Amino acid sequence: MNKDLSRQKISKYIGKQVKFIYNGSRNQREKFKGTIISVFPSIFLVETNDSIKRIKSFSYNDVISSNLQIIEK
């Protein structure tokens, strides 16, 4: 998968609630639900659906390298 294909895939989820699994450094795994709110050429923004609304940014390389998994509900 390349950057353009991952951008197209992520663009389909704009405004929809999806589940994310982020594999961080040192085997840290974070699971959260959120909504993709914006897509830019290098990154995309996710608003979490936690009790405290946060906005997180991810790069398309996170998706390509499987550090970030997007699971449709």
Image (tube, rainbow, N blue to C red):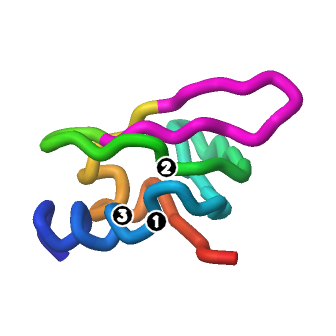
> Is residue 54 rendered to the left or right of residue 56?
right
Task: Check disc 3 and report the residue beneath it.
Answer: 10
Residue 29 placed where, x, y %?
67, 48
Give the CA distance from mark 2 to mark 3: 8 Å
* Cα gap from disc 1 to disc 2, whole angstroms: 6 Å
User: What is the number of the mark on residue 36?
Assistant: 2
Give how far across and how far down residue 10 sits, in percent.
36, 63
Answer whether residue 16 is magenta in the image: no
Residue occupying the point 75% across, 41% down:
49
**Considering only order in the chain, which callout, 3 or 2, is on the residue closer to the N terminus?**
3
> Is 45 left, or right, of 31 in this rendering?
left
Q: Secondary structure at mark 1?
A: loop
What is the residue that sits farthest to the front in this orientation? 15
Counting other residues with Cα less than 10 Å from the Cα at mark 3, is it few (<14), some (14-19), or many (20 or more)?
some
Question: What residue sits right under mark 1 in the picture?
Answer: 13
The amino acid marked with disc number 1 is Tyr
Residue 47, relative to residue 5: is it above or below? above
CB contact under 8 Å: marks 2 and 3 = yes
Q: Position of residue 36 (x, y in %)?
A: 49, 49
Span colored in magenta: 44-56
Find out whether the residues at labels 1 and 3 contact each other: C-beta distance under 8 Å: yes
Q: Is residue 38 left or right of residue 7?
A: right
Above or below for 15 versus 4: above
Q: Look at the numbered discs 1 and 2 and tell me whether their residues touch, using CB distance below 8 Å.
A: yes
Determine the secondary structure under disc 2. strand
